[in-house]
Image (cartoon, coloured by chain):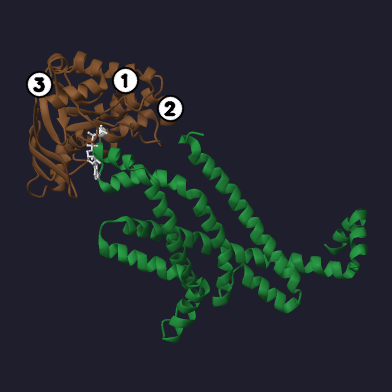
Amino acid sequence: MISVNGLHKQFGNLEVLKGIDVKVNKGQVIVVIGPSGSGKTTLLRCLNILEMPTSGSITIDDETGDFSKPVGKRKIDLLRRKSAMVFQHYNLFPHMTALQNVMEGPVIVKKLPKAEARKKAEQLLNKVGLGDKLDFYPHQLSGGQQQRVGIARALALEPKVMLFDEPTSALDPELVGEVLQVMKDLAGEGITMVVVTHEMRFANDVADEVIFMDEGKILERSKPSEMFTHPKEERTKQFLNLIQ
Amino acid sequence: MKMARTMKFQKDGSVKMFWNNLTIEPEKMERYLDIAQSSLLPLLEGALVYTLPLTLITFSLGLMIAVLTALARISTIKPLQWIARFYVSAIRGTPLLVQLFILFYGLGSIGIVIDPFPAAIVGFSLNVGAYASEVIRAAILSIPKGQWEAAHMIGMSYSQSLRRVILPQATRVSIPPLSNTFISLVKDTSLASLILVTEMFRRAQEIAATTYEVLLLYTEVAMLYWIICFILSLIQGRLEHRFDRYVAR
Ligand SMILES: Nc1ncnc2c1ncn2[C@@H]1O[C@H](COP(=O)(O)OP(=O)(O)OP(=O)(O)O)[C@@H](O)[C@H]1O
Ligand SMILES: [Mg+2]
């Protein structure tokens, strides 16, 4: 489903991704962990082309972008459509209701008829447990509710891959569970997911594999049980000790 | 008409006192009221035919210029940035009155004759455009980067992101400062009198010149400007309230 080859990303002189190679199969849930500044967010953003990779290639589904040469707008659009992102700070549109937030992509970008988009948005909001909050503005919702709208908004795009960048790290502890539960349900439906998170319980319960990133590289990749009990790399051990 | 008013004032003792204290003879007062009343219609006509249209047209045109200028300023295309900067700097760095004189008398003197009203439209639009562009630019820049990203994430193009996500939010931020620009504009249109537009203030000048009641006329026209601006500030309040719907308080 995802195939990343030799992905590099540089900000000026700072090389943030130093050659990333990843493959993710259809339906897999991959959790990405690693110290702050290791490039986790940058990797996700490159997958959604919110950040233009410096070189390397990204394939999602049947769409490939080769960033060794200039990539056209059309290509970026096609590749971006394959994934959808859930942001750490939700980034909901504050001037739109929950329903409008979810409908916006289908109506404006995919030109779906309004009635149809509305029905779909209602279903999705129901699914994330917000069927009774359709007409609420983001500021009228709790953090956990906002993030669930964020998930519904991403799902409305019908992406092949869902990308989550620390979706619960801005939440009060008591609100983390409701968001993780929604993500668990999605994983159960066989949606391909790449999740950056420090929720080790979630990784352990839901992830098919865990990737450990450090200084712009993938150091280690294995099943969660193995990663958490027998990490191969010294850096991984140090990191896991730190956060546990 | 005169009778009616006299009687009305006679009924009211305090007004009589007022006259006596200020030692304004009733005849003089009558003349004031008469002129104030008979000048009201021409003044209001000046407001309805010139002051308000001039304000509304130039504010609309100015806003369009302002949005384009703001977008040029934040674009990554250098020449666009330069043109926008040059324009804003030139307009903000020179007096509005001088700009109007250049457009009307200056251009007229080299054979490019523009009628007073169109000249005023051009002058005020360019002026509003420059000032409002700074407001709009600041408002656009005040919208968090995450909003652009979310818009791109759901597949929007630059112009879709701008129209659907950024500008609606920037509008809310801009309403208070733009209202100030608008209210200033109402008053600034009085400068058009100096390029022969017969707007409200010029009417007042004309009537003052024939009646010699200078203080009366200028006070009257001041009151009219004040009333217009007061109504506008009420509308501003309502607008702000409407746009505050989606903001946490
Ligand atoms: N737009 C940018 N311009 C310059 N440097 C950037 C930019 N975005 C990220 N960086 C740098 O890239 C490095 C990796 O950042 P990134 O956000 O990907 O790390 P992360 O692994 O997500 O960290 P965290 O756990 O703190 O979220 C950091 O050193 C960061 O300062
Ligand atoms: Mg991050």
Label 2 belongs to which residue?
A136
- Is residue B16 placed above or below B213 in the rendered structure? above
**Residue pictured at 89% horizontal, 65% vertical:** B22
| Numbered label attached to residue A236 | none
From this viewpoint, is residue B82 visible?
A: yes
Q: Earlier in the sequence, mark 3 or mark 2?
A: 2
As measured in the structure, the alpha-carbon distance from the residue carrying label 1 to the one carrying label 3 is 31 Å
Chain letter of mark 3 equals: A
**Residue pictured at 40% horizontal, 44% vertical:** B168
Quarter of the image for residue B88 reads bottom left
Tell me the colour chain B is drawn in: green
Q: Nearer the viewer, residue A166 or A81?
A: A166
Q: Indicate the position of residue A180 as horizontal and vertical percent values.
A: 29, 18
Q: Nearer the viewer, residue B201 or B44?
A: B201
From this viewpoint, is residue A192 visible?
A: no
**Residue pictured at 46% horizontal, 35% vertical:** B246
**Residue pictured at 53% horizontal, 57% vertical:** B182
Quarter of the image for residue A151 reads top left
Label 3 belongs to which residue?
A232
- Is residue B182 placed above or below A139 in the rendered structure? below
The chain coloured brown is A
Q: Earlier in the sequence, mark 1 or mark 3?
A: 1
Label 1 packing within 10 angstroms: few (<14), some (14-19), many (20+): many
**Same chain shared by disc 3 and disc 2:** yes
